[in-house]
Amino acid sequence: MLDQTSAPLYEALERFRKMRVVPFDVPGHKRGRGNPELVQLLGEKCVGIDVNSMKPLDDLCHPSSVIREAEALAAEAFGAAHCFFMVGGTTSSVQSMIFSVLKDGDKIIMPRNVHKSAINALVLCGGIPVYVDPEVDKRLGISLGMEPKKLEQAIKDNPDAVAVLVNNPTYYGVCSDMRSIVETAHRHNMMVLADEAHGTHFSFSDSLPVSAMQAGADMSAVSMHKSGGSLTQSSLLLLNGTVNADYVRQIINLTQTTSASYLLMSSLDISRRNLALHGDKAFKKVMEMASYAREEINALGDWYAYGKELVNGTSVYDFDITKLAVYTRDVGLAGIEVYDILRDEYGIQIEFGDISNILAYVSIGDRLQDIERLVGALDDLKRLYKRDKSGMLSLEYIQPKVAVPPRRAFYSEKVSLPLKETEGKICTEFVMCYPPGIPVLAPGELVTKEIIEYVIYAKAKGCNVQGTEDFEVNRLNVLK
């Protein structure tokens, strides 16, 4: 057992700050002296530890002292054999997982409702996706989890696949049967990769769904900055003992910066310590607040904050009760409309709004009075803005039709056409609402009438539609 009360990287930074070393290295602001406005914005202590790699502070590309110790502590806290600090967000963690197991032409089995980072990785490495189409909750319009029986069929149809990627959980809190997925994949000599961007907290409470490492997955990408409390863009990549950590480090170093931020890394170190020492208690409070909010919101009528009642043992094996997702269409409003009204009229910034839902992210930094304010705002909002819901688009997730591998489509000769003229064509770029960043269209997929209608509707409602070369998403690149 390691000493989880220590934070070796942060402590080394504090020692270094007190040494008052004269900086003739980068960054050029020289502890803030060259940029007073930066000091005013961030404070002297913050800019004072915005430093470069050096022997006393180790090197993220080849850690041998305090960073290596901090990573070992994080690995133990999360039940992993190895851990890498990542400063490019969980996008870099997801992509490093995929790059570590796939080569050009290799197949990977995954649900289609993956984050864009996973499909971007396939464009870069030439991997071939085998999609396990998730069941869709037709009322909520959201895709659900990966079902083991569908995974079995995908493996039977593609015995040459090398890995399985699964979300644990989805953005909306839906969890798959991780243990069955791991057992099935390993039985067929396939590795299991978990996008755990929204499941950092799973490792610190027995009352929450199982974490990927607990379930025996080979690798897991964990967004510490989401529910773990670290700074934005900081993430962890976890490995179990079956994976060659030295090779994975080489893969990470292909794309990760050589000028890693010590602000981000020290925030990972401090946040790991906080979770290791107080995580169980902290997340118990988060669960209580989210459950209370769910009950209060449902008592208002018309709003539907969903939870454990969705569990069916298959497509919804478990549910993350810290996720406060609310169905909005019975109020006659799209989720994105509620998102905008809450921010502009009530001073409440939620995580995202889509066509039919909103997500209020409840975490270790929230307070009961914040929950009360949100519930009160939704009550008032319903009274002021409720309208007839007829004519609203109901389906959030549309099953794709893959015609060409992503990399081939992305790099092929293409032509730009008005969006309404692309039906029946093969897309060569991404189209998505962000957040949550799940592509409506990815390179190599068939453009359908349903997708065109969805994109037009999402734009009209105010969703942040992006991914295309045309900034306004009025045109779409398709194969010639």
Image (cartoon, rainbow, N blue to C red):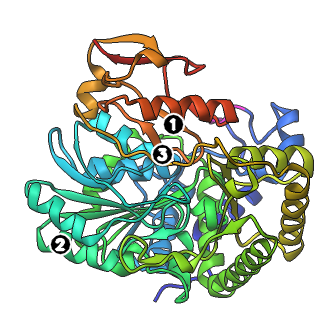
Element at label 2: helix
Q: Residue 454: horizontal and vertical position, in percent?
A: 52, 35
Q: Residue 350: horizontal and vertical position, in percent?
A: 74, 54
Inter-mark Cα distance, 3 to 2: 27 Å
Q: Nearer the viewer, mark 3 or mark 2?
A: 3
Q: Residues within 10 Å of mark 3 (few under 14, many from 20)?
A: many
Q: Amino acid at mark 1?
A: Met
Inter-mark Cα distance, 2 to 1: 33 Å
Q: Residue at x 56, y 62 (%)?
A: 172
* 1 and 3 marks in contact (CB < 8 Å): yes
179 and 176: which is toward the camera:
176
Q: Residue 270: horizontal and vertical position, in percent?
A: 65, 69
144 on left or right of 34:
left
Inter-mark Cα distance, 1 to 3: 6 Å
Q: Residue at x 9, y 62 (%)?
A: 156
143 and 235: which is toward the camera:
143
* 3 and 2 marks in contact (CB < 8 Å): no
Is tag 1's residue or tag 3's residue first in the polypeptide sequence? 1
Query: What residue sits right under mark 1 in the picture?
Result: 432
> What label sits on residue 200 in the rendered view?
none
Q: Write down the region rendered in magenta.
A: 24-28
Q: Amino acid at mark 3?
A: Ile
